Amino acid sequence: MENIVLTIHLILALALVGIVLLQRSEGGGLGLGGGGGGGDGIMSGRGAATALTKITWVLAIAFIITSMSLTIIASRNANSSSIFDRLGNESQSEEIDTDALLPPTDELLPPVKGEGAPLVPSAD
């Protein structure tokens, strides 16, 4: 169900971007539209603006509905506990014996020749 709503949501997003880019810029912000404009096209003038505006509204409302639907679906599938709660429980339940991981301290020291011998290698 979530995948279907997500697919519809993505299609709506792309369609909404396309419809918005098709609309004429009234202020001439992009430098493409905004002039008086003649009636050369099939749908020209006010009729095209009204149709594109209605399509934009329908797509925007559908986009908002799918956004809310995805939020509701995700909240139902989510766990009620926090990720920090789950991390805290795992670290307390599994105690690690650090003494078993470390080598014995006798092996960490250099070998000693005699009682008063320095702990440096000989030059021989």
Image (cartoon, grey):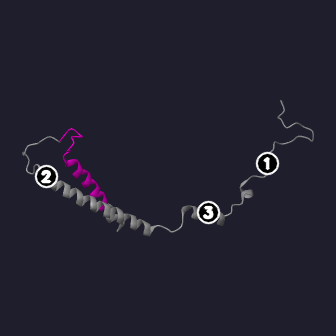
Residue 113 image offset from top left, x and y in percent: 88, 40
CA–CA distance between discs 1 and 3?
A: 35 Å
State the quadrant of the N terminus: bottom left
Q: What residue type is labelled 1?
A: Glu
* Image: 54 above or below 36: below
Q: Which of marks 2 and 3 is nearer the N terminus?
A: 2
What secondary structure is found at the residue carrying circle 1? helix
Q: Which amino acid does label 3 sit on?
A: Gly
Number of the front mark, 1 or 3: 3
Q: Earlier in the sequence, mark 1 or mark 3?
A: 3
**Which mark, residue 85?**
none
Residue 10 figure quarter: bottom left
Residue 26 image offset from top left, x and y in percent: 20, 44
Residue 68 image offset from top left, x and y in percent: 36, 64
**How many neighbours does mark 1 have within 10 angstroms: few (below 14), some (14-19), or many (20 or more)?**
few
**How many neighbours does mark 2 have within 10 angstroms: few (below 14), some (14-19), or many (20 or more)?**
some
Which sits in the foreground, 61 or 77? 61
Residue 109 shown in magenta:
no
The answer to whether residue 37 is left or right of residue 77 is left
**Which mark, residue 107?**
1
* Segment tinted magenta in the rendering: 7-33
* Image: 61 above or below 45: below
What secondary structure is found at the residue carrying circle 2? helix
Q: Which of marks 1 and 2 is nearer the N terminus?
A: 2
Which residue does the image show at 19% across and 48% down from the upper left? 22
CA–CA distance between discs 1 and 2?
A: 86 Å
Write down the residue under mark 3: 88
Write down the residue under mark 2: 48
The answer to whether residue 68 is left or right of residue 49 is right
Which residue does the image show at 72% across and 57% down from the upper left? 98
